Image (tube, rainbow, N blue to C red):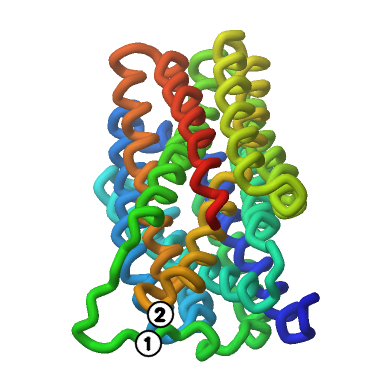
Amino acid sequence: MLTEVQRRARLAVTATFITNGLVVGAFVARIPDIKNTLEISNSTLSLCLLASALGVFAALPFAGKLCAKYGSSPIAFYGTLAMVAAWTLQSFSLFAVWAFALTAFLAGYFLATQDVAMNSHAVTLEHQSSLRLMSVFHGMFSLGGLSGGLIGGLAAQFEISYSIQTLLICIGITLVAFAVRKLWLPGAVDIHVIEPGTKVHRPAIIWLFGFFGLCSTIGEGAVGDWGGVLTRETYGASPFVSAIPYILFSATMIIGRFSGDYLATKFGAARVLASGGLIASIGMGTGLLLNSTAGAIFGWFWMGAGLSVAIPLLFSAAGAMANTRFADQMAPAQAVAMVSGISYFGFIVGPPFIGFISDATTLRTALFIPAVLALAIVASAKFAKSA
């Protein structure tokens, strides 16, 4: 059972996961409009998305060190403030491709800083309470993504500018950040002091968790960034209908993640991971074979359901191992950041790779790649047993 202090901290972590997903979902829903405003090709859009993903990748090791040094709670708060400032700036940069790419890098950087801190705090709560909480927290991220997707889709339909949409969302996120500031556990609870000059060891199994996470995030990034473009440009869907695949993807991610902790406790993380990989691969492949807007909606629905449990279970396993088996080698925040760093590389290579392949073939053909990679998650089941 959670104590009163832990329940308050869970509320703070929950709110932060929601806001993190909210800004991502609202952005993804407007990618077709951003592409049209900048008047760029799929390949150029891919490079802009690459800039954002590179910002994520660049921030992860530094975010892990900051959380280990100062504790995750202050980094989560100040990371949130920096994140909303960067995303607001990005939304006003659509006058030139270079400006959008630069501000997209900053937005990704501070989004990742907030991400590592909130995940590290979640690991601390799991360790203190001996309860599985991570999957539900990631469900809250997906709830935020769903809400953001709905907001972005409706804003696009009613021709509300992306900058006004982002400004209003970021004002709301700032208010939430200050409202929950005092609910976090003290920073001291997860400070992990490492003697100067001590080399941080990175166990092989943590690298492996990162690789499996990579296979999942390639799928998440690709279907998130390209679903709207596929349905609007290939199948002629309206602005709102083109947002439906991502909305349903987020919805099934929510359902899967809200169920993930219960399922992992009852059946074991290994079985849940293996089943998820199969569901994602078969569902996405079938949807693409249908070759229609309805098929895309079908595929994105099952892709979300299958991938929903992968990242939270892998993060939880990495944090748990750092707290127990590798306590003298690395901090839980550093383990989470390491798995995040490898996993989120999928957001770097996935969307632009799909864009380049789509220019050489078709976007539909390129999107079969995430369906195949989802099968790799099945292999993670063997290693999750030891977490």
Q: Viewer-proximal residue, 53 or 96?
A: 53
**Which residue is painted at 53% across and 81% down in the image?**
73
The CA distance from mark 2 to mark 1 is 7 Å
Local SS, label 2: helix
Residue under numbered circle 2: 68
Q: Are marks 2 and 1 in contact (CB under 8 Å)?
A: yes
Q: Quadrant of residue 164?
A: bottom right
Measured along the vertical axis of the image, is residue 350 above or below residue 357?
below
Q: Earlier in the sequence, mark 2 or mark 1?
A: 2
On the image, the x and y values in percent for residue 295 come to 64, 15
Q: What number is the disc on residue 193?
A: 1
Q: Quadrant of residue 333?
A: bottom left
Res. 113 in view: yes
Local SS, label 1: loop
Farthest residue, direction left: 197
On the image, the x and y values in percent for residue 198 come to 23, 81
Horizontal arrangement in the rendering, residue 328 relative to residue 219 (left or right): left
On the image, the x and y values in percent for residue 210 come to 40, 50
- In which quadrant is the N terminus drawn? bottom right
Horizontal arrangement in the rendering, residue 136 relative to residue 100 (left or right): right
Res. 239 in view: no
Q: Viewer-proximal residue, 72 or 49?
A: 72
- Amino acid at the residue labelled 1: Val
Measured along the vertical axis of the image, is residue 52 above or below residue 292?
below
- In which quadrant is the C terminus drawn? bottom right
Q: What number is the disc on residue 173?
A: none
Q: Residues within 10 Å of mark 2 (few under 14, many from 20)?
A: many
Q: Residues within 10 Å of mark 1 (few under 14, many from 20)?
A: few
Q: Viewer-proximal residue, 118 or 279?
A: 279
- Amino acid at the residue labelled 2: Ala
Horizontal arrangement in the rendering, residue 312 relative to residue 180 (left or right): left
